[in-house]
Image (cartoon, helix red, strand yellow):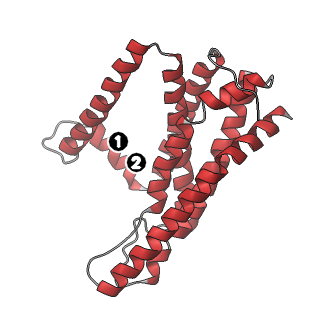
Amino acid sequence: MKIKQMFLWQLKSSLPAFIIFFCIITALTTVLTIVFARNGNGTFNMAAASIGVFFLFVVGCASFAENLHIAFGNGVSRRTHFLSFLLFAAFSSALTAFVCVLIDMIPSLSPSTYIPLLTDTPGMQIFFYFTLNFGFMAFGYFLAGAYYRMNKAAKITVSIIIPAAAITCFVLIMNTAAPVGPEVQPLPLFLQWMLASIMNAALFWLLFAALFLFLGWLVTRRAGIRQQQPAG
């Protein structure tokens, strides 16, 4: 029962953010579709589903500290808190994927300026974005949990290392995407496998989500309480 209560509390507390996000993305997509349709120049795709991934990453980051305090303030265990987040993440990922794929259909009302980001069926796109959303929510939750347990020096160090590592990986991917010799290049081969089909990509993001959910549980099970808040 406490899992259900925590799940419903997370839904209720996050509902305004989801409504605002969906309304803004829908409005922007509609307005820009009209603009491009009238001008008739260039192509347009809002890629709302891709933007939703970053929105859920932020939601994942915000789902650790406050929720943990609420849980402990109402006698909810770490395990129950984590399982309720797991349910919330799955539900939010599926909902955002479904709504954003529908929003991405708005530009198709102007065929002369519309270029789809993905050519797969809507059902496959929803499944793919569900896995992508789920992975980034898990990643955000883990990062928030890791920061929660770090001291000030560790936080500063990680804040420098993570962006530097991300930039380095991006540069390496861009510079090794094209073969430059007969030698084996594991990174491009992996990218080729991942990009070969949407199911391959979905499988990767499911494994990505499983990894960071596991790491998220590890930081949750030993997290202490810094400032308890009663449920209001």
**Secondary-structure class at tag 2:** helix
Residue 77 placement: quadrant? top right
**Distance of mark 2 from mark 1, alpha carbons?**
6 Å
Mark 1 is surrounded, within 10 Å at the Cα level, by few (under 14), some (14 to 19) or many (20 or more) other residues, namely few
Please give the label number shown on residue 190: 1
- Dividing the picture into quadrants, the one containing residue 63 is top right
Q: Dot 2: few (<14), some (14–19), or many (≥20) neighbours within 10 Å?
A: some
| Rendered location of residue 204, percent (x, y) | 48, 43
Q: Is residue 223 above or below residue 11?
A: above
Q: Are marks 2 and 1 in contact (CB under 8 Å)?
A: yes
Q: Quadrant of the N terminus?
A: top right
The image shows residue 151 at horizontal and vertical percentages of 46, 13
Label disc, if present, on residue 194 of the rendered structure: 2
In the shown orientation, is residue 157 left or right of residue 228?
A: left
Q: Nearer the viewer, residue 63 or 189?
A: 63
- Direction front: furthest residue: 232
109 displayed left or right of 114 = right
Helix, strand or loop at mark 1: helix
For the view shown, which residue lies furthest in the right direction? Answer: 1
Q: Residue at x 50, y 49 (%)?
A: 55
Picture quarter with the C terminus: top right
Residue 59, placed above or below residue 222:
below
Residue 101 visible, this angle: yes
